[in-house]
Image (spheres, helix red, strand yellow):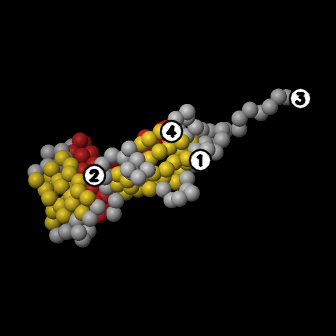
Amino acid sequence: MSRIGRKPIPIPKGVEVEIRGNVVRVRGPKGELTREFHPDMTIVQEDGYLLVRRPTDQRHHRALHGLTRALLNNMVIGVSTGFRKVLEIVGVGYRAQVRPDGSLLLNLGFSHPVEVKPPENVTFHMEPRSKEIVIEGIDKQVVGQVAAEIRRLRPPEPYKGKGIRYKGEHVRRKAGKAGKAK
């Protein structure tokens, strides 16, 4: 049996779970998420926990078992505490600012500024005089996707390390030109 799939998911206080067939709606203090799961998986709510059960021990059912449990757990965590990704901007003249409408304006060495509009349930934050962009939201997949799209605008380059990177990401540096021999 799947080690991840058989773990029960605790439902925190203030979170409501509604199960209708293979559609699950999770409501909490941060918002609401709805997702349709594979019809073979059975999702049951018992004693303040969510349990996922599979019909057989076939390979695709074992894979779906762990996937379904992980997606459900991310929904519960998202509506109760939320998810966040932090990006760092490294480079002289590279700047970012959050506009009053919630969009992000980036100056990344291009001839024009780049504007990134947040999708629904995603917000951008920046501390004043900081080069860190904080992306917060209730859907883990969407937060990660937005962070990846922003990073893709100017990925860190290996010679000087300039660009946008995840906080704590290590960028391998290259030596560059060795100079001419004597």
**Mark 1: amino acid:** Val
Q: CA distance from mark 2 to mark 3?
A: 62 Å
Earlier along the polypeptide chain: callout 2 or callout 3? 2
In the picture, the disc for residue 90 is 1
33 relative position to 118: left or right: left
Q: Which residue does the image show at 27% across and 45% down from the upper left?
A: 63
- The crowding category of the residue bearing disc 4, from other C-alpha atoms within 10 Å (few below 14, some 14 to 19, many at least 20), is few
Viewer-side residue, 160 vs 97? 97
> Could you say whether the residue bearing mark 2 is in a helix, strand or loop?
helix
**Between tags 4 and 3, which lies in front?**
4
174 relative position to 165: left or right: right
Residue 148 is situated, as x and y percent measured from the top left of the image, at: 43, 43
Residue 14 is situated, as x and y percent measured from the top left of the image, at: 23, 69
> Could you say whether the residue bearing mark 4 is in a helix, strand or loop?
loop
In the picture, the disc for residue 113 is 4
**Mark 4: amino acid:** Pro
> Could you say whether the residue bearing mark 1 is in a helix, strand or loop?
strand
Q: Is residue 27 above or below residue 163?
A: below
Q: Quadrant of residue 111?
A: top right
Q: Is residue 171 above or below residue 76?
A: above
Q: Is residue 181 visible?
A: yes
- The crowding category of the residue bearing disc 1, from other C-alpha atoms within 10 Å (few below 14, some 14 to 19, many at least 20), is some
Q: Which residue does the image show at 26% across and 68% down from the upper left?
A: 12
**Residues marked 4 and 2 touching at CB (< 8 Å):** no
- The crowding category of the residue bearing disc 3, from other C-alpha atoms within 10 Å (few below 14, some 14 to 19, many at least 20), is few
Q: Which residue is mark 3?
A: 182
